[in-house]
Amino acid sequence: MYQLAGKRVYVAGHRGMVGSAIVRRLAQENCELLTSPREVDLREQAAVREWFAANRPDTVVVAAAKVGGILANDSYPAQFLYDNLMIEANVIDAAHRSGAQKLLFLGSSCIYPRMAPQPIPEEALLTGPLEPTNEWYAIAKIAGIKLCQAYRREYGCDFISAMPTNLYGPGDNFDLTSSHVLPALIRKAHEAKVAGAPSIEIWGSGTPRREFLHVDDLADGCIFLLKNYSGEEHINLGSGKDLPIIELAQLVCDVVGFEGQITKDTSKPDGTPRKLMSGDRIAKMGWAPRISLRAGIEDAYRAFLEQQA
Ligand SMILES: NC(=O)C1=CN([C@@H]2O[C@H](COP(=O)(O)OP(=O)(O)OC[C@H]3O[C@@H](n4cnc5c(N)ncnc54)[C@H](OP(=O)(O)O)[C@@H]3O)[C@@H](O)[C@H]2O)C=CC1
Ligand SMILES: C[C@H]1O[C@H](OP(=O)(O)OP(=O)(O)OC[C@H]2O[C@@H](n3cnc4c(=O)[nH]c(N)nc43)[C@H](O)[C@@H]2O)[C@@H](O)[C@@H](O)C1=O
């Protein structure tokens, strides 16, 4: 078991939804938290090496990335590929050079083939073609997993990878053009309720299925893996349950209190039809999520209202 107590832990991306949840969770671990200032652009190798040489973290969590929903991924392929390759390569290499003992890299469930078997086992990686709307981001995330494996094989680094499913919660991005579906639905339902509008519009057919995990469960799973896992294979981190987008929209409307219609904009992409991950590996290690989807959406809606105030 890896001890976090007394360690200098660097969270890259600490201002983001995941990074800030990991910072909140680390408060229970009696470790020293390190963050880098906004001026340190993690795409810049010299700046990253300089920061690591000056701060020498024992433990690193890579929660910095160019992140967005289906439309942002599809619209900015260069940024999603280049930024993510540079951030992860710079941080992983600098962690090795400065002698970090442990590193956790965060990927995404979109690394798996579009038509992977469901629920998706970790072994499905690189067994088929990717979903076209996010292949740029997926390729970068696959490279991050491979970097961790390569640094383990060549240099003996204890660098591990976790693959989170679709996440949501406090600190989410509620911008309708760049966000993921769940924060977008919260905002659409809330604004329609306030305006007395008759309907909200969802993107696509409403039939794709997605799995959702509250970011506080994700943060807990990340700390669990840092302490308990040391291996070359990446580990799935999800809730084990999925639902069609139309049912998610109905649930969000119910939580928000919007009683109008839900219409569909079928000119927008559906993306992958289903990506429910198998959580068997982490379950066997002894970890399980705790926050139900309804309770999680209630919490995310509260956070949205606070972010608006
Ligand atoms: N959200 C989701 O549904 C999912 C997320 N993940 C993964 O979790 C991780 C975190 O995602 P999430 O918290 O949602 O994303 P956010 O966009 O909320 O946070 C990303 C963070 O990365 C930082 N960042 C981005 N580019 C740079 C850069 N060039 N230099 C320094 N910092 C940078 C941002 O900094 P700043 O605040 O200054 O912009 C931000 O703090 C990512 O690896 C993502 O792939 C995986 C699966 C699903
Ligand atoms: C985390 C994950 O996130 C992305 O993949 P995605 O799961 O397809 O992303 P999404 O949350 O944006 O959409 C999920 C589904 O929901 C539908 N949908 C309906 N209405 C809205 C809507 O209003 N906004 C959005 N964004 N989607 C909507 C949408 O059409 C799609 O069918 C990738 O970035 C990928 O790289 C990645 O890792």
Image: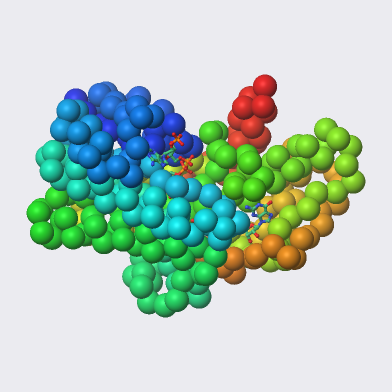
Specify the quadrant that holds the C terminus.
top right
| Of residues 292 and 137, the one drawn nearer to the viewer in this rendering | 137
| Of residues 36 and 10, the one drawn nearer to the viewer in this rendering | 36
Residue 84 position within the rendered picture, expressed as x and y whole percent measured from the top left: 38, 52
Tell which quarter ligand 1 is in. top left
Residue extending farthest bottom = 128
In the image, residue 122 sits, relative to residue 127, either above or below, namely above
In this picture, residue 278 sits left or right of residue 292? left
In the rendered image, which quarter is residue 94 located in? Answer: top left
Say how the picture is coloured.
rainbow
In the image, residue 62 sits, relative to residue 305, either above or below, namely below
The residue lying at 74 percent from left, 43 percent from top is 188
| Of residues 141 and 186, the one drawn nearer to the viewer in this rendering | 141
In this picture, residue 55 sits left or right of residue 78? left
Residue 236 position within the rendered picture, expressed as x and y whole percent measured from the top left: 39, 57
The residue lying at 33 percent from left, 44 percent from top is 43
The residue lying at 36 percent from left, 29 percent from top is 39
In this picture, residue 214 sits left or right of residue 58? right
In the image, residue 102 sits, relative to residue 164, either above or below, namely above
Residue 167 position within the rendered picture, expressed as x and y whole percent measured from the top left: 51, 47
Q: Is residue 108 visible?
A: yes
The residue lying at 69 percent from left, 41 percent from top is 186
Tell me how many marks there are.
0
Q: Is residue 295 visible?
A: no
| Of residues 238 and 183, the one drawn nearer to the viewer in this rendering | 183
